């Protein structure tokens, strides 16, 4: 074994932990040694049929001899020479036009007594395979759903313009039964990806425990070997359906070999059969995809006496989790500040949505879906609106202060109804004002002024001024105000007052005739 030798006491710990059921990766983390070293000692103990109890009884030097002795082939000096060249040979094999025979010829020129070509290739193969072992993945029914996009696209024709539109093909499969689902979507965007995934779950009639996507940009923000950062929308999707998301490792297609293989089969069993057909909508294309994919699922698999669909219905469908009643809606998140007009501006829709005026100037969190806009401040929901696309305002009257509510309610009927609750003559005046041919908005300020005069003036004088204005067909705020404030209305009041006492020497009206 290359590098610093591992103490046999540590090897005994490795064997004991392995027998207890701990995985090789966990043993590596627990003991702080390389995982390949762990694998090597476990494999070696198995090859020489060395049990744990027997290993614990053997003294360390004797145990060291059992593990390090090796076979005659690997104690050959020629092997040690070739072993030192393996990193170089592996690197050169990756270059264009370089073959094993060329590398062997270079090797034999430097080491004339080295291995012949057959043995050279044999030892090279052994080392390359040992460096990259391939595990047999065992799958549990109803546990995982592998997800991917096919590399090749399909297309349909726009019936209005004749344009050929290419679409992406979403492919998913249950690795236990190999049951496959395919669907065409316009792009690989997050919305299209999650829409196709929700359609897949509805087609299956239930949800698995684990979703295994490729490291798609739609599903994974940052590709990391061990802890990829999931897209927020993908997390919301998984939480909605009660499952978890475990993306495959970057550059490890064997992690989802089932779906990779199904993509190849889809090419031959679906793509090839649709090659001479023309579709005029994505719905037509999806209908054809569904039919051909179902034929694939109903075809008997090789070396078995059942089809993918039969295995799915018999062993897997009843183990799927029940789907939620409501379909998943994509949620978008943003933070905005409430404007002085107590609205937030959602730039995606070019639309203003109201919040209670007490939150003016506050920074709020906005969560919006295809149908709803929810606004939160300090961990409390303060507003909910139906989502509307297109420039404009969506306002709830209760969110406005009293002044703004009055301003927004203004209309001819509003002013007439308000006047009716205060005075019949005021109602008549305002009704007469709106009877004009001009737009009603021009009279709003006049009505506001008259309502203000009504509040501030003596009721009798106000109503008398209104009567005079109506009789003279001269209705305006300034005229009625001048009547209330002027002396003419006061003199008229005094002219109708009776004298406090009568006098005999006062000449009556008959005297002047």
Image (cartoon, rainbow, N blue to C red):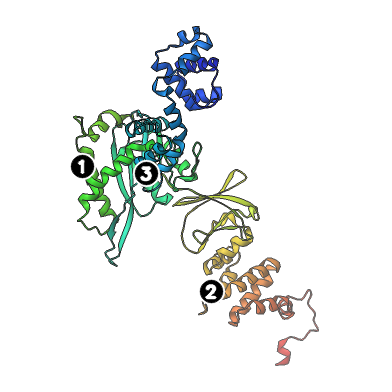
In the picture shown, does residue 105 fall above or below 503? above
- Depicted 192 relative to depicted 463: above or below: above
Which quarter of the picture shows residue 457?
Answer: bottom right
Question: How far across and how far down the image is residue 89, in percent?
Answer: 42, 39
What's the CA distance linking mark 3 and mark 2?
54 Å
Mark 1 vs mark 3: in front = 1
- The quarter holding residue 200 reads top left
- Residue named by callout 3: 197
Choose between 233 and 366: the one closer to the eye. 233
Question: Residue 20, can we see it?
Answer: no
Q: Is residue 195 visible?
A: yes
Asked which secondary structure carries label 3, the reply is helix
How many residues crowd mark 1 within 10 Å: few (<14), some (14–19), many (20+)? some
Residue named by callout 2 = 440
The mark that comes first in sequence, 3 or 2, is: 3
Where does residue 206 sit, x and y in percent of width and height? 34, 36
Q: CA distance from mark 1 to mark 3?
A: 21 Å
Which disc is residue 275 wearing? none
Which residue is under mark 1?
295
| Residue 372 image offset from top left, x and y in percent | 47, 51
392 left or right of 43 in image: right
Element assignment for label 1:
helix
- Choose between 296 and 14: the one closer to the eye: 14
Of residue 92 and residue 177, the one placed in the foreground of this image is 92
Ranked by sequence position, the earlier of labels 1 and 3 is 3
């Amino acid at each position: 074994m290359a590098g610093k030798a591992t103490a046999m006491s540590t090897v005994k710990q490795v064997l004991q932990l392995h027998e207890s059921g701990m995985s090789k990766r966990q043993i590596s983390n627990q003991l702080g040694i390389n995982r390949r070293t762990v694998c090597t000692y476990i494999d070696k103990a198995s090859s020489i049929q060395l049990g744990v109890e027997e290993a614990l009884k053997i003294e360390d030097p004797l145990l060291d001899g059992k593990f390090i002795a090796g076979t005659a082939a690997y104690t050959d000096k020629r092997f040690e020479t070739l072993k030192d060249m393996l990193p170089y040979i592996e690197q050169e094999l990756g270059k264009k036009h370089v073959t094993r025979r060329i590398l062997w010829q270079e090797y034999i020129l430097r080491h004339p007594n080295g291995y012949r070509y057959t043995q050279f290739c044999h030892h090279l193969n052994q080392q390359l395979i040992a460096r990259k072992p391939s595990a047999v993945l065992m799958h549990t029914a109803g546990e995982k759903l592998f997800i991917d996009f096919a590399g090749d696209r399909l297309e349909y024709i726009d019936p209005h313009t004749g344009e050929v539109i290419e679409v992406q093909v979403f492919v998913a499969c249950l690795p236990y039964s190999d049951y496959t689902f395919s669907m065409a979507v316009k792009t690989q965007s997050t919305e299209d990806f999650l829409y196709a995934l929700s359609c897949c779950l509805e087609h299956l009639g239930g949800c698995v425990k684990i979703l295994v996507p490729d490291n798609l940009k739609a599903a994974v923000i940052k590709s990391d070997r061990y802890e990829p950062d999931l897209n927020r929308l993908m997390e919301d999707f998984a939480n909605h359906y009660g499952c978890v998301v475990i993306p495959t490792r970057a550059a490890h297609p064997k992690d989802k070999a089932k779906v990779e293989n199904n993509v190849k089969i889809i090419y031959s069993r679906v793509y090839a059969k649709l090659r001479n057909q023309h579709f005029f909508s994505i719905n037509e294309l999806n209908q054809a995809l569904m039919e051909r994919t179902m034929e694939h699922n109903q075809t008997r698999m090789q070396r078995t006496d059942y089809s993918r669909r039969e295995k799915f219905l018999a062993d897997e469908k009843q183990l799927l989790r029940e789907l939620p009643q409501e379909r998943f809606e994509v949620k978008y998140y943003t933070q905005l500040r409430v404007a002085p007009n107590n609205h937030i501006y959602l730039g995606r829709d070019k639309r203003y949505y109201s919040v209670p005026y007490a939150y003016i100037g506050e920074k709020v969190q906005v969560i919006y879906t295809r149908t709803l806009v929810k606004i939160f401040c300090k961990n409390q929901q303060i507003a909910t609106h139906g989502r509307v696309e297109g420039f404009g305002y969506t306002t709830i009257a209760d969110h406005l202060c009293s002044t703004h509510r009055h301003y927004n309610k203004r209309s001819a009927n509003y002013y007439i109804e308000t006047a009716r609750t205060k005075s019949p003559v005021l109602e008549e005046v305002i009704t007469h004002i709106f009877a004009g041919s001009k737009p009603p908005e021009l009279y709003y300020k006049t009505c506001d002024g008259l309502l203000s005069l009504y509040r501030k003036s003596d009721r009798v004088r106000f109503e008398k001024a209104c009567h005079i204005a109506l009789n003279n067909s001269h209705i305006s705020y300034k005229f009625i105000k001048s009547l209330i404030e002027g002396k003419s209305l006061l003199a008229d009041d005094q002219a109708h007052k009776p004298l406090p006492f009568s006098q005999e020497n006062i000449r009556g009206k008959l005297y002047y005739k």
